Image (cartoon, rainbow, N blue to C red):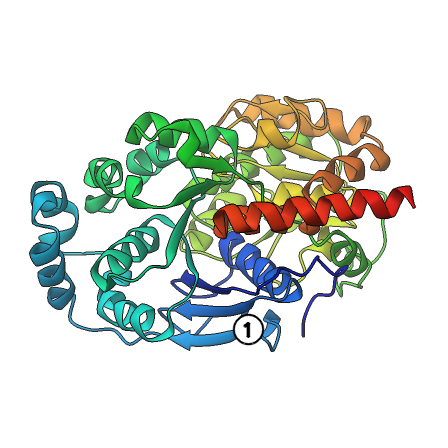
């Protein structure tokens, strides 16, 4: 099943765009790349989705025109030998996080097969997302010695990951990025905050990095927000407001703070909390809810492929994260007209919510401030019109044009400018 949207301007001549990802497992990156793949196809391009693992909840969302290729893993040592032989000058930088790590990135095993793909299929451009697949994409292009452009996408603030991750290799990743990222033709970041932080840590010149926000299929989201939910709290809006959290159950999302804030809200008024998502902290969060005495008012249904139905029926969506890139959940909530409360984490929320104009921003980990902002929003919610007007700034048609301009270089910029010009001429006529 594909997600329809208005036709995008055709590009001439068409290009072959390869998108490289670990998998299509549930998450913001997979959702965005599936949407962009459809947009590129609608623009007349050929799209290959190159995966390390042929799995994930979004596999069924791909348009039939997108060709899916699954790489074969090789010995990690084969990839390490390739890197040592061809990139000897970077030996000292790569030694600790890549060459001798006991737990190297899983995507490293797919480097040899990605090299073969580039040589065999000769795409016009290779687009990668996520830090470790970005590095593999850069190494594969160098080792394949092909002429394709390589564009990488950084989607979160790296300094926060290096501080919070329990993976040893992340402690040494920043020097690797400073050495390897300049070899990309262009780098896309999902917010100005990620852009500035990446430039600071890598020394990349500003003209090398472009901020492009994540896209929204606004009409599709609004249509799906009307679908029913088989749960008494959400079948129709009742007297008890619904507070919603959406995201993986991992430390980055800090749902513990949301649960504690909700316990304060419950002392002031009846309410229910729904947390959509799955992850390794489920049992810990369930135990916390029970210890706080709020477990009867908390529902954690796991992953759903239609979070919009929940957003359309919730009184407020709360983002309690300690770090983000550009949280899709805030964009999607705006499209549904759902009020938002968010931590002012780096980075993205303040840009989306226009420094608190569209929804309140609170300090990270501050239970009292989060509870106060939730109660205030429940009492005086912003207008649905204001929220949906902000969502329009992230429409898929404009975002995909920006991506094509970066992916295809000068030719992409020329074709996008032509399409925009023709659109304006059509409006005048």
Residue 405 image point, x, y percent: 55, 47
39 relative to 336, above or below: below
Asked which quadrant contains residue 38, the reply is bottom right
Q: Secondary structure at mark 1?
A: loop
- In this figure, what is the number of numbered marks? 1
Out of 300 and 264, give the one closest to the viewer.
300
Q: Residue at x 49, y 26 (%)?
A: 364
Q: Which residue is mark 1?
A: 66
Q: Specify whether residue 344 is in view.
A: yes
Decide: few, some or many residues near mark 1? Use Cα within 10 Å; few <14, some 14-19, many ≥20: some
Residue 347 image point, x, y percent: 49, 31
Out of 151 and 132, give the one closest to the viewer.
151
Please state if 129 lies on the left or on the right of 228 as rendered: left
Asked which quadrant contains residue 232, the reply is bottom right
Please state if 285 lies on the left or on the right of 100 as rendered: right
Residue 295 image point, x, y percent: 59, 48
Asked which quadrant contains residue 37, the reply is bottom right
Please state if 137 lies on the left or on the right of 213 as rendered: left
Q: Residue at x 30, y 68 (%)?
A: 114
148 relative to 284, above or below: below
Please state if 179 lies on the left or on the right of 335 as rendered: left
267 relative to 394, above or below: above
Which quadrant: the N terminus?
bottom right
Q: Residue at x 59, y 71 (%)?
A: 62
Out of 345 and 48, give the one closest to the viewer.
48
Out of 293 and 358, give the one closest to the viewer.
358
Q: Specify whether residue 324 is in view.
A: no
Q: Residue furthest right?
A: 429
């Amino acid at each position: 099943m594909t997600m329809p949207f208005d036709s995008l301007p055709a590009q001439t001549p068409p290009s072959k765009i390869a998108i490289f990802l670990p998998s299509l497992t549930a998450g913001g990156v997979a959702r965005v790349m599936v949407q962009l793949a459809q947009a590129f196809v609608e623009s007349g391009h050929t799209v290959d989705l190159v995966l390390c693992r042929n799995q994930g909840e979004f596999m069924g969302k791909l348009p039939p025109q997108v060709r899916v290729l699954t790489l074969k893993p090789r010995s990690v040592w084969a990839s390490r030998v390739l890197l040592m032989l061809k990139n000897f000058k970077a030996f000292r930088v790569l030694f600790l996080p890549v060459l001798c790590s006991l737990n190297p990135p899983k995507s490293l095993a797919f480097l040899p097969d990605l090299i073969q793909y580039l040589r065999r299929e000769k795409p016009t451009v290779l687009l990668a997302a996520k830090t470790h697949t970005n590095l593999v994409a850069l190494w594969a292009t160098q080792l394949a010695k092909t002429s394709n452009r390589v564009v990488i996408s950084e989607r979160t603030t790296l300094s926060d990951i290096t501080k919070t991750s329990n993976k040893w290799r992340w402690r040494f990743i920043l020097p690797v990025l400073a050495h390897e990222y300049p070899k990309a033709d262009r780098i896309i970041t999902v917010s100005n905050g990620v852009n500035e932080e990446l430039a600071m840590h890598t020394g990349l010149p500003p003209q090398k990095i472009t901020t492009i926000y994540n896209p929204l299929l606004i009409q599709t989201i609004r249509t799906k927000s009307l679908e029913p939910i088989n749960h008494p709290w959400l079948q129709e809006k009742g007297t008890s407001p619904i507070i919603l959290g959406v995201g993986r159950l991992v430390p980055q999302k800090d749902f513990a703070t949301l649960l504690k804030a909700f316990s304060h809200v419950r002392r002031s008024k009846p309410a229910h909390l729904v947390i959509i998502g799955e992850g390794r902290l489920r049992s810990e969060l369930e135990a916390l809810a029970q210890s706080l005495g709020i477990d009867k008012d908390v529902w954690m249904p796991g992953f759903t492929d239609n979070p919009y139905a929940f957003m359309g029926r919730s009184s407020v969506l709360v983002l309690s994260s300690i770090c983000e890139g550009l949280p899709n959940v805030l964009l999607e909530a705006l499209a549904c007209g759902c009020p938002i409360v968010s931590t002012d984490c780096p980075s993205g929320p303040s840009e989306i919510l226009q420094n608190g104009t569209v929804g309140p921003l609170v300090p990270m980990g501050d239970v009292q401030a989060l509870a106060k902002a939730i109660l205030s929003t429940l009492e005086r919610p912003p207008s649905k019109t204001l929220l949906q007007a902000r969502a329009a700034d992230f429409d898929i048609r404009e975002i995909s044009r920006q991506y094509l301009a970066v992916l295809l270089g000068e030719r992409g910029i020329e074709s996008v400018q032509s399409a925009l010009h023709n659109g304006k001429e059509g409006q005048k006529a």
